[in-house]
Amino acid sequence: MLAGLQGAGKTTLAGKLGRWLRENRHAPLLVAADLQRPNAVNQLQIVGERAGVHVFAPNRATASAIPSTSPAAPSPTQNRSSTTSSSSTPPAAWASTRN
């Protein structure tokens, strides 16, 4: 989970981190959880598409009622990662970018 002030670059960082995980043979999933800001879900979908990362985003009709069913477990040969549990070190180039 990423948290911070508006305009701090959380969505951009999520996309960059997701792309980095994908390039390192993980299968990240971005989850749209900011349902209060009108364009947050669309913004995350665009960033995820550009990064080549899957995005879970509830549609507007079900935004207030997130499904209670859990996703299917990954197969033993599939390496799943979230954006918060990678043990790999991020690229040094990230230290110099603010977006």
Image (spheres, rainbow, N blue to C red):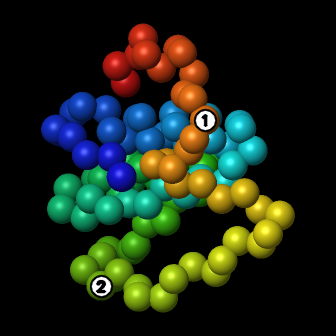
Real-space Cα distance between discs 1 and 2?
Answer: 34 Å
User: SS class of the residue under badge 1?
Assistant: loop
- Going by the numbered disc 2, the residue's amino acid type is Ala
Which residue lies at the image location 42% right of the left edge and 35% below the top edge? 13
Res. 49 visible in picture: no
Q: Which residue is mark 2?
A: 65
**Numbered-mark total:** 2
Q: Is residue 44 visible?
A: yes
Q: Which numbered dot is residue 88?
A: 1
Closer-to-camera residue (44/27): 27
Side (left or right) of 27 relative to 69: right
The image quarter in which residue 41 lies: bottom left
Q: Earlier in the sequence, mark 1 or mark 2?
A: 2
- Quarter of the picture containing the C terminus is top left
Q: Residue at x 66, y 77 (%)?
A: 73
Relative to residue 6, is residue 76 drawn left or right? right
Residue 86, given in percent of the width and then of the height, sits at: 56, 44
90 above or below 2?
Answer: above
Residue 16, x across and y down, in percent: 51, 34
Q: Nearer the viewer, residue 24 or 52?
A: 24
